[in-house]
Image: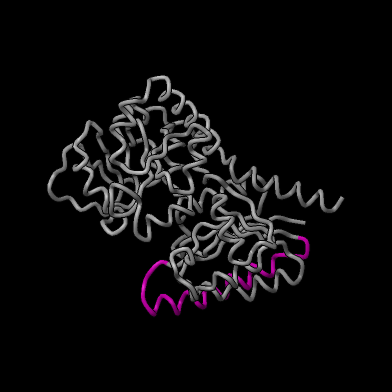
């Protein structure tokens, strides 16, 4: 019985895609899993869709021929391509399951949480023997959607592989807050209102699509960097996980999504040794507080008061928690834990 994992690459020399997906493949291959490459979408428009339809069919036909009964295949869901084209993989996955292949789906994103249906989500996930969800809230959502008969394990946090600890990121100043990610106004509109807080909190922004306009007091845009370089450039005392248009809550589609998902930026901050600030209604909030990884607030307007009343000892405890968790994320411990627990549960059933 062999273990395989799907890895997605560009057609141009099969270059890598996103860091979250790449890290999963690297963790698994380091543990002896065999990587099976498939192509991901690159361009846009009808010509690329037609090309990818043919390429996807060929890719998954090849994958299905390499697996035998009793083998295990891990798929990162959703596939990194056009949703309609990705459905061409479903017949091959169904055929593998029918011949006795164990299917594991590691969930990165769920369109249904944003109210989007018809992208093949149910057809994919109903084939799973194991679903790897972000957290308990996502697990409960999956059960409500009818997947309660599946084995479901929670990742808790995404791993963030780094060869060494980026020791210079944490400046030791809790009043200096890092914001990393897509700074597009419709996703992170709140960053264009941070100057309204009128406090001693200083924000350092990192990421694409920042619309520089009227300068904001206490807000500095530090540029855009690849994921592999960010740990060498981030500087601050906390990392902020927030989405939406408002300062007093996380609103809109992206803000509401925080109630179910674990943003990869949280793992980036922790891997860099930065404790995090999260919305107290987010799925991450309880985990962050329980494990002393940061603080949870209902509104960014609370930050000055929370920081003012935070003792140096309390802040150091959060930094220590972040460093310890960061060490686990940098070596891929979260995914490893989930897969070991699943294998142990299978062994118990067969005994």
Q: Which of these two is toward me, 289 or 298?
A: 298
At 51% across and 53% down in the image, what residue appears?
A: 21
Q: Residue furthest left?
A: 214
Q: Check the image and report above or below for 59 versus 285.
A: below
| Apparent side of residue 71 relative to residue 168 in the rendered image (left or right) | right
Figure quadrant of residue 229: top left
Q: Considering the whole magenta stretch, tell me its main secondary structure.
A: helix
Q: Which residues are magenta?
A: 42-70
Residue 347 seen from this side: yes
- The quadrant of the picture occupied by the N terminus is bottom right
Specify whether residue 239 is painted magenta. no
**Residue at figure coordinates x 25%, y 41% from the top left:** 222
Query: Horizontal and vertical percent for residue 295?
Result: 42, 35
Report if residue 36 is visible in the image: no
Height in image: 143 above or below 249? below
- Is residue 45 a member of the stretch shown in magenta? yes
Residue at 50%, 62% in the rendered image: 110
Considering only vertical position in the picture, is 290 above or below 299? above
Residue 300 in percent (x, y) is at: 30, 42
């Amino acid at each position: 019985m062999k273990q395989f994992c799907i890895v997605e690459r560009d057609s141009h020399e099969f270059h890598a895609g996103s860091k979250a997906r790449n890290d999963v493949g690297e963790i698994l291959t380091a543990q002896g899993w065999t990587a099976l490459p498939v192509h991901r979408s690159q361009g846009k428009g009808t010509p690329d869709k037609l090309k990818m339809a043919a390429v996807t069919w060929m890719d998954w036909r090849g994958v299905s021929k390499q697996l035998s009964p009793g083998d295990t295949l891990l798929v990162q869901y959703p596939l990194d391509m056009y949703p309609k084209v990705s459905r061409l993989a479903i017949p091959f996955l169904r055929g593998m399951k029918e011949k006795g292949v164990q299917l594991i789906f590691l969930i990165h994103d769920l369109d249904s949480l944003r109210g989007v249906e018809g992208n093949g989500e149910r057809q994919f996930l109903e084939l799973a023997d194991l679903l790897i969800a972000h957290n308990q809230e996502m697990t409960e959502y999956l059960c409500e959607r009818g997947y309660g008969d599946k084995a479901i394990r929670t990742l808790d946090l995404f791993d963030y592989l780094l060869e060494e600890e980026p020791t210079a990121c944490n400046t030791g100043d809790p009043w200096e807050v890092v914001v990393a990610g897509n700074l597009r106004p419709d996703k992170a509109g709140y960053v264009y209102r941070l100057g309204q807080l009128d406090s001693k909190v200083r924000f350092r922004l990192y990421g694409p699509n920042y619309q520089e306009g009227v300068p904001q007091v206490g807000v500095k845009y530090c540029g855009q960097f690849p994921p592999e370089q960010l740990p060498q450039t981030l500087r601050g005392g906390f990392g902020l996980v927030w989405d939406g248009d408002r300062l007093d809550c996380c609103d809109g589609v992206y803000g509401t999504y925080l109630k179910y998902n674990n943003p990869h930026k949280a793992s980036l901050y922790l891997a860099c040794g930065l404790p995090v600030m999260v919305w107290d209604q987010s799925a991450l909030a309880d985990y962050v507080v329980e494990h002393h990884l940061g603080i949870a607030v209902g509104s960014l307007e609370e930050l000055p008061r929370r920081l003012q009343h935070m003792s140096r000892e309390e802040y150091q405890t959060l930094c220590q928690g972040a460093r310890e968790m960061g060490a686990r994320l940098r070596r891929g411990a979260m995914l490893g834990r989930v897969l070991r627990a699943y294998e142990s549960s299978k062994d118990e059933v067969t005994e």
